[in-house]
Amino acid sequence: MTWRETLRVSRVAFSELSLQAVFAFRQGNVLPAAWSKPLVERARGRVLQSKLVISIVLALLALGAGAIIHQRALNPEILPAVPNGLFDSAVLTGLLSLDIALLWWTGVQVIPTLISSGVLTVLEPLPIDSRTLHRVAGVLYLRLFDLPAATILVLTPVSVGLAMGVPAGLAALPGTFVAVTFALALSLLTGRFFLRRVQGSRGGGGRAVVRWAYLVLWLVPAFAMFAFITAAPAFFRALSDLATQGPSTAGNLLSAAFPFSFALLPAIASGGAASTAILSPTAELALGLALAAYIALAVWSVVWLAGSVRSLLFLPVQRSVDLAPSSAPLRSTGSARAVLTKDLRIASRTPGYAFLILLPILDAGALGLLTYATPAQNPIASSLALGAVTSAALLATFFGPAFFAIEVIAYSYGRSLPLSNRSVVLGKVALIAMMYLIGSALILGFTLLRFFDPLTFGAFILAELPAVIAAAFLELGLLFRWARRRGLAITNLYAGAWFAVLVAIPGLFVAGLPPLLFDLVQPSGLGLAILVMGAAAVAELAVATPVAFGRGAS
Amino acid sequence: MAATNPGNGGLPLSLDGLSVAYGERPAVQSLSLSVQPGEIYGLLGSNGAGKTSTIKAIVGLVRPVAGEIRVFGLDALRDSLSVKARIGYVPETSMLYEALTPREFLEFVSSVRRLDGTTATRRLSSYAEAFRLEPELDEPIATLSNGTRQKVLIIAALLHAPPLLVLDEPLNSLDPRSVRIMKEVLVRYVGGGGRGVLFSTHTMEVAEQLCHRVGILDRGVLRGEGTLAALRGRVAAGDASLEEIFLKLTEEEGGVRAAVDSIGDPSA
């Protein structure tokens, strides 16, 4: 089959992939009752929109990095202890790391969909030669990343070139290619791990640890930006120390580390002698060897990707065959608790769902750590801790609509059960409250380690709890009313259910109002501020409860 | 087998002027039929005839544009939860929570159906043994074959011993042994009286063996209904098979001949 025919087959397969990514019919989702546009066209449009959003973020990062480098060239008083070349290399290191993180994050999100869509299983029995099937699989895989990857490949060298000159822009090309290749390989590697160790895994102990470790790993790229912003000052301080002491072993190691080694190339190309301030002549040799090794690894990654994508799409989900079936009895619980238990069990094997639950908790953990690292005498520390609790509340409630969307997205069977909207809402609200309380408990733990004021923090957490529940009631109640009026279930957030996104706004307002009142009243006394905050939260709960359970909601 | 209380009297199922549409496209038009106590009613039809749309409307997955659905006298739109509690449903396609194991899925279903743990465990144990499902009860559903998924759905439909079973092509993907078991279970199920089964299929032999009455659906419209003998009388063919009756009523007999002729020699 010629490349032209291969691309034609790939186009058809990608349409099917888009359709399944957005409407999930293969997972049992019911055909929407009425659409203004054909479904495939709509699905392709949604996928393109998603890629555009990621590409715009990547473009802003690339142009932002160039702007920082340019500003520093104009104002040498910014971080004067760090030589120009080193500063530029540090900025480029951050950019390349973020590019990898965002591309990898895209990959880990869409690869499970690529696998479950089963697009290649339709083609495999047809008389299409093996080489073409490999090509189709490769094209499909590349199309998941095409626009974001092209943005990185084009805009990174262009931005560096504009800021540091054409030779520097050209010198940025190898690092950019290697970064994109590594991100694509990491995505495939984690996708394969998901199939082998997560999706079909069962049992506790080590297996449960591996399952949840993968789900946390899924979050790492999402945290990269936050981590970089947090770590940047310390990184520049370390660079300044290295520049002061001249060539050293630490400097040599840093130069050989990815992606700093590639980030040094534009600085060297633009003739910045200072870039080599931390390099000894032997380190230049080490840098050369490291670059050669990374390029070799990238080439090997391309070969590995070309051979592995097709097998990934056919890899059967692996079972834990060594475990005997249990004879555990069925434990019957109330409907709301059954919804909660089911959600947690699904989350333990579904990264997309676990992400929604773990993100607010990990965010709270990270902010708690930040509070712990801030000197206790600093008044910002306590504000930081209270802000962290607010952040946990806002993030926990922000995902309320997504929990509802997941309930109905692919699991139409659930709607054939005698499961009332009231039970679904209660189950979801219990999950949201649990996320908030676990996140807040983490922050409370860190603040207790740093400065002992459990009453204030405990009271703040409890005063905010009714507002979190009220926000969740409001969001889910409005969604059920909307679904009832339309006579159909919301399929998912990308399928045109903009209402699901819109209800998060009043939800955020409800969750955010009590902490805002606390902030306003705090100068008049801490106790009074917590009292006002708690009263406002309880009032919100009283107003929101009828929205969730009143007439027309269930 | 202790059944869920049907309550409220009335027929296990009655449809009156049911219409279902997807946008502008009608799928079912003014369908009226009933399932009597102790009856297995077969809903027959070609692909796209409206069988699955009818069933989805009964179990609450699709909202009808017109008509009435009553289950043991209860209005399926107004008392949807009470109606769903009285129905055991097997969907046409495997609609399952793939990340759960069968045991976790059935635990969720029995909790939602407010079945006590001891009864649910006892029933699961006997059904799992009959369908040889025990070795796979604790594997994630994502790893199971289509046939095994179908067994999970059948057990989920039977677990609460509902007074009405609504089965959409329930024998799809099952092995011959499980098909035989399922047929026996259905016959015994309605044997006690009071219960009813609505059974959709396009396999005529199965309908002939199992169903007390059949309804023939064609392009959303009911073309004929009754016992096999009554339908034979209607098409004036004393020893006609259900397949022949189906083709006559849907006016496809000539169409089939023309279609075969248009194909000609498949090897040519």
Image (cartoon, rainbow, N blue to C red):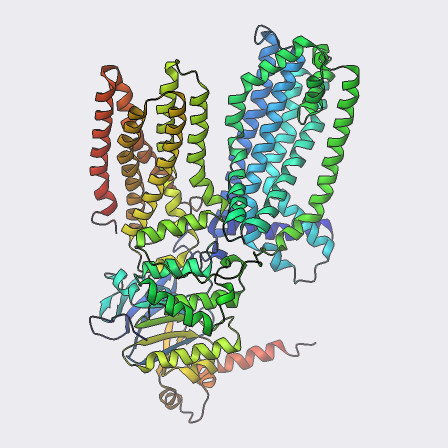
Asked if residue B210 shows in the view, the reply is: yes
Horizontal and vertical percent for residue A271?
73, 13
Q: In this view, does B185 lie above or below B133?
A: below
Asked if residue A38 shows in the view, the reply is: no
Q: In this view, does B168 lie to the left or right of A275?
A: left
Residue A275 vs residue B227, the one in the foreground: A275
Horizontal and vertical percent for residue A530?
24, 24
Q: How many callouts does the rendering have? A: 0
Q: Is residue A217 above or below residue A273?
A: below
The residue positioned farthest toward the top in the image shown: A77
Answer with the quarter of the image where residue A510 lies. Answer: top left
The residue lying at 50 percent from left, 82 percent from top is: B254
Horizontal and vertical percent for residue B157?
38, 67
Q: Is residue A463 left or right of residue A75?
A: left
The residue lying at 52 percent from left, 70 percent from top is: B173
| Quadrant occupied by the N terminus of chain A | bottom right
Horizontal and vertical percent for residue B177?
51, 78
Residue B219 vs residue A236, the one in the foreground: A236
Q: Is residue B128 left or right of residue B194?
A: right
